[in-house]
Image (tube, helix red, strand yellow):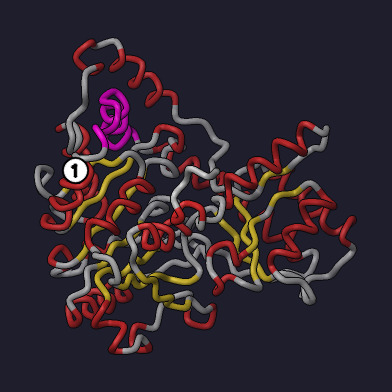
Amino acid sequence: MSYQSNRVGQIPPYLFAEINKKKAAMIEAGIDVIDLGIGDPDLPTPTHIVEKLIEEMQDPKNLKYPSFIGCNEFRQAVADFYERQYDVKLDPNTEVLALIGSKEGIAHLVPTLIDPGDTVLIPDPSYPVYRMATYLANGKSYSMPLKEENNFEPEFSSIPEEILERSKLIFLNYPGNPTAATVDLEFFNRAISFARDHQIPIAHDSAYNMVTFDDYKAPSILQVDGAKEISVEFGSLSKTYNMTGWRIGYVVGNKEIIKALSTLKTNIDTGQFTPIQKAAAFALNSDQSCITYHNQIYRERMTAMLDGLASIGVKVDTPKGSFFVWAPVPKGYTSTEFATSVLEQTGVIITPGNAFGSGGEGYFRVSLSVPNQRLYEAVDRIKQKLEITIV
């Protein structure tokens, strides 16, 4: 007898949970696995942030139930960050909400804004949570294809009017996961104009906003005039400060949307551990040189991986943001076939592009979450054991 609901029974296993199972089994079998699958930084959380967490844990007041909306220090720190980084002013009391990681907030935003049968406009390929949260809320997904020839930007003008009439939310994500695509402020101007014309709110997932290279600085959608009237932006400390396991993020922007999300959240969770929030506030307010240092490491890794891929025929333009490489699979393979062959024959984990939606077919994603020498070794294994030339 099965005790799970029909809905849960129809949910496929989360891809990266399945990858972790395969990885554990291969390691148990004595295989040297190089994991380029999940975007989990191998670099440590900066010492000064860890020390602040330990300090805050010594205060008994911080060990009680946390604030439902986030402690004052964290919300103010997020507002201060936006003013410094983007010249965007936020009211920390009404336009900032603390999250238990941005994934949690994104998943809960969908049932906050849609009713059963409503449509959510979702980039394809994109972070799987957008689509799964829509399914769990009894919503309908409409894919906005992200094509390389369009800089992986959606073509809003191609969305049918009957779809727009039923749509209650648009997801965007730049720097992009999995595509590593970046945009300028002009794109966000067009997106906000489109959203206002059709009265469809935008949720911009900005998890990789501070992982950028060379002279590129990722904009915030809230820099657009009037953006706060119809959009929110999700942020995370996971990638910026290598705090993935800390589970701390935020959402900022439209106060009505944030109030509604807060109403849902206060009924199902009790907020993030206060010492983590205060350490996160300290991270945002303290010396930011660690970001530059980490980005230099990712830039070097990016160069190493692109050079390695070029040596076997893969040509990829250098991304300006994120720590992902989005590359074409070899001729004659599907995305899944190639990722499976690489894993089974070389012990290297890569992510098939179709895991992020049908629009990802024909690509694979590499995460720069290991040192340079392991990146070179991964490419060398593929070159030697698969005996292919990628074109």
User: Can residue 299 be seen in this snapshot?
Assistant: no
What residue is at 28 percent from the left and 71 percent from the top? 118
The answer to whether 170 appears left or right of 321 in the picture is left
Q: Position of residue 90 (x, y in %)?
A: 13, 51
**What residue sits right under mark 1 in the picture?**
80
Quadrant, the N terminus: top right
Q: Quadrant of residue 278?
A: top left
Residue extent of the magenta highlight: 269-287
Q: Position of residue 125 (x, y in %)?
A: 51, 69
What residue is at 26 percent from the left and 25 percent from the top? 274
Q: Position of residue 252 (x, y in %)?
A: 21, 52
SS assignment at label 1: helix
Q: Residue furthest front?
A: 1
Up the image or down, 246 lies above or below 86; here it is above
Main SS, magenta residues: helix
The one of 212 and 391 positioned closer to us in this rendering: 391
Q: Position of residue 309 (x, y in %)?
A: 73, 62
Going by the numbered disc 1, the residue's amino acid type is Asp
The answer to whether 234 appears left or right of 123 in the picture is left
